[in-house]
Image (tube, rainbow, N blue to C red):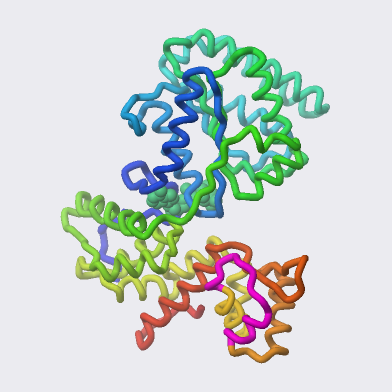
Amino acid sequence: MVQPGRFNPFRPNNMVNPGMFVGRVDELQAVDRCLFQAKNGNPQHFLVLGERGIGKSSLLYYVELIASGKIKGFNQVGMRFLTVSIDLGNCPTQFDIIRKIARGLKQAAGEHLIAREAAKALWNWLTNWEVLGVKYQKTSTEMDSEEVMEDLVTRLSAFCSETVGHLDGVLFLIDEADRPHSDAGLGALLKFFTERLARKSCNNVIVGMAGLPSVMTRLRESHESSPRLFHTLPLEPLEVSERKQVVEIGLLNAAEKNHVATRATPEALSFIAELSEGYPHFVQQFAYDAFEQDHDDVIDVEDVGIGAYKEGGALSQLGDKYFAEMYHARIGSEDYRRVLNAMAPYGDGWVSRKDIICESGVSETNVTNALGTLKQKNIIIQDESRRGFYRLPTKSFGAWINAIKAAKQKTEGQSGELFLG
Ligand SMILES: Nc1ncnc2c1ncn2[C@@H]1O[C@H](COP(=O)(O)OP(=O)(O)OP(=O)(O)O)[C@@H](O)[C@H]1O
Ligand SMILES: [Mg+2]
């Protein structure tokens, strides 16, 4: 039973706030170096890469707070960057991307106490351009967007000169960079932008981007050498101790707000860590549902298991949010489930048909049929270069299937409506 009025600290549907941000030490140190370099006139751009839900936006948000000086970075030195945060969802053309950048810049400069005055010329130009931008778009050609970009760079570098001594630089944080189609030319645009800035000796402007791993291909398709502009930061699942730390910090937060401490048994912490396989969105979701499930202020293994496995619980939430297509197709047949179960421990690694037959306990003919259908529905991928090898599209899909198995085992014999994995 959910206890009325009890604050649940976990955030399965939202970026994590800085107080609950855990891990990513290497990545933050790398970003710290990029900022330090930019501050000293040697801009180094960075690109955060990772699966859905691995924590890209949360990391960018944390970086934004460090770069703008709202929280301290590693060396405890307060930074003074003007941070411009945008996301590239819904940007079908290069003009849409430029408009997002321009609007983001205008808003960030307008909200910044010191930058506001120096930004006036930039601001006027952006306002005029926005009016013009509508016209531009109607007759948009590549020439036009380069002209606008050139203009933007000129104003931006004038702005940087004027704010020397007041600002360390300008940091553009671009999320969802995988979203624009390669036709939108993000790679070419960034190449042009950074080269023009360098030519104007405007060396304290940097770009930090985040996107799915496919962003590399998109960038390359748009401009062969554009991926080389970036120092890449691939995000991996959290370490076991970090997974537990996420839950512990959450519970401390909850204790402050609820005036009653809820604790988790060491076994429950380990179970959440195991079920999540280190995916931060999984940790948040399992912890959220375990917290909801608990009603004696001690989260135990049973709370975690039932919270995960019950109908509408963590596993079905994750299924709906991240694996919707796969999730609905796979519960259609027992054979599919067994084939996927056999593949899940390999994550996104290749598995041979032979091993699948052996490990699933499904007959050869039925495995062949299941593999054919799963492939057709894009639930699994077939190796083009070798016959009879298949894999899951992402590691986290494998983690989700493994978690269904593990939670099912722990909740066997429980009454009530359970999630039918
Ligand atoms: N470092 C972290 N510490 C604790 N929780 C985290 C951390 N990073 C991410 N999370 C949690 O994981 C979930 C996913 O995070 P986030 O939205 O940042 O991922 P994402 O990679 O941007 O996802 P998407 O690809 O869907 O945009 C959120 O619930 C967030 O609260
Ligand atoms: Mg995100």
Residue at image point 51% right, 23% down: 38
- 99 left or right, relative to 359: right
Q: Is residue 321 magenta?
A: no
Residue at image point 41% right, 68% down: 275
Residue 78 position in % (x across, y down):
35, 24
**96 up-or-down from 334: above or below:** above
- 169 left or right, relative to 17: right
Q: Residue furthest front?
A: 386
Chief SS of the magenta region: helix
Quarter in which the N terminus is drawn:
bottom left
Residue at image point 69% right, 67% down: 381
Residue 214 position in % (x across, y down):
66, 49
Name the quadrant containing residue 9.
bottom left
Residue 293 position in % (x across, y down):
31, 70
**235 up-or-down from 403: above or below:** above
Residue at image point 42% right, 70% down: 313
Residue segment shown in magenta: 344-360
Residue 248 position in % (x across, y down):
27, 56
